[in-house]
Image (cartoon, rainbow, N blue to C red):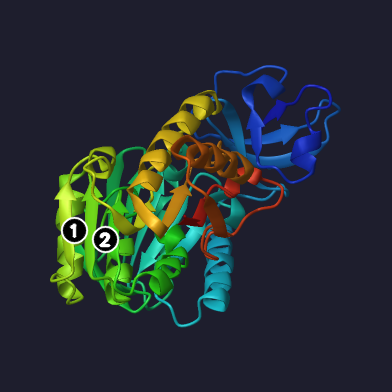
Amino acid sequence: MITMRLKPKEDRRLLRGHLWAYRNEFIDLPDFVDGEVVDVDSDSGRFIGRGFYQSQGGIAVRILTRRQAPLDQAFMSDAIARARAYRETVLPGETTYRWVFGESDGLPGLVADRYGDVVVVDSSCAFYEGQTSNLAHAFMAYPDVHGVLFRVCGEKERHGDVPPTITFPLNGLSFTLNLEAAQKTGMFLDQRTNCHAVEPLAPGARVLDGHCYAGLWSCHAARAGASQVLGVDTSAPAIEAARTNAEINGLSNLCQFECADIRDALNRNERYDVVILDPPALAKARSQTARALGLYQAINRDAMNAVVPGGYLITSSCSHFVDTPAFLEMLKRAAAAVRREVWALDVRGAAPDHPVLLAMPETSYLCCAVLRVL
């Protein structure tokens, strides 16, 4: 087994449970193959963990186990089984959920979503290119799983029966997903519980759903009694998916969808009872945090302007470099910029199928704030 040795005192964070060993923490970095299995030792030779090497980026090794055990089919099957058992506990009876949430489930760099009898797996880590058969075997060991679609390092690989389009239930609604056109693993299931926040606010309301993607928030608002919902997204395939999902749920008469930039939509001098913002991650690196906060402030300022007095803004950040205190401070600045008094009614994280690993703050990435704008 290849061993990589840390510099003095660089083992402390890893011993406390963190799973990323950074490039600058090692004594040297030999020219290993991307995805190769390696052991990480302290400077004194103490075994820290076993994981895989990454040739690019700041993270050199992602640790999978604290034991000197093989990372084989049995290891993958055990991890998949533990992850499923937890979801069956917190989401009993559900067949749509995030089955694997990377580091929190002991498979760093890997996410997998279940949609009924199909599982969609996504990773940019070369290690998992060699694990697709083991993972497919682990998922399909369950009789209610018939196919697995892998998106690993930009390549697609299918095991079993994976149709091009699937329909699945979520929160009592039905959604259709084109697996060829969908982003990442398909739906953004981290907001599945937060979508309920719009329901008591929706009856009789005019709702603007920014970054609507496939219409998850829009359909929840319309079902709850909104008088009108406008969903906006810059992706034409997303808009088509949203229209389809509104139609199959019998909500087409309440929902309209438009391919446009949300800031353009917010600056048309229209006013809404509820505005929803769910943008993509605006800070994908720590160096982008300041710029992201500026973008968040601009869009939330426009959104507050577009809310009628006494209306509501539901706004989110999925940038883990923008933590909750920073996000709330940004919202305070946005409110001051438009001279509106704003109440924070609720601040939420991701759904329970996205558990937070306490040793890794990076796994707590989603902040969803429910605000009243006076």
Q: Tell me the residue that label 2 is attached to.
A: 215
Asked if residue 246 can be seen in this view, the reply is yes
**Above or below: residue 101 compared with residue 38:** below
Q: Tell me the residue that label 1 is attached to.
A: 241
Across and down, in percent, residue 330 comes to 54, 38
Q: What amino acid type is highlighted by mark number 1?
A: Ala
Residue visible at 52% across and 38% down in the picture: 336
Counting other residues with Cα less than 10 Å from the Cα at mark 2, is it few (<14), some (14-19), or many (20 or more)? Answer: many
Query: What secondary structure is marked by label 1?
Result: helix
Across and down, in percent, residue 361 comes to 65, 45
Q: What amino acid type is highlighted by mark number 2?
A: Gly
Across and down, in percent, residue 168 comes to 29, 72
The residue lying toward the viewer, choosing from 151 and 367, is 367
Instruction: Find the distance from the CA under tag 1 to the CA under tag 2.
Output: 7 Å
Task: Report whether 217 appears left or right of 331.
Answer: left
Q: Locate residue 202: give its quadrant.
A: bottom left
Task: Report whether 253 appears left or right of 91.
Answer: left
Q: Quadrant of the N terminus?
A: top right
Residue visible at 51% across and 44% down in the picture: 109
Task: Report whether 42 appears left or right of 39.
Answer: right
The residue lying toward the viewer, choosing from 273 and 89, is 273
Give the numbered dot on residue 262.
Answer: none
**Residue at the bottom extreme of this rendering:** 93
Q: Are marks 1 and 2 in contact (CB under 8 Å)?
A: yes
Query: What secondary structure is marked by label 2?
Result: loop
Residue visible at 54% across and 47% down in the picture: 365
Task: Report whether 310 appears left or right of 320.
Answer: left
**Above or below: residue 332 compared with residue 75:** above
Total count of labels: 2
Across and down, in percent, residue 15 comes to 79, 42
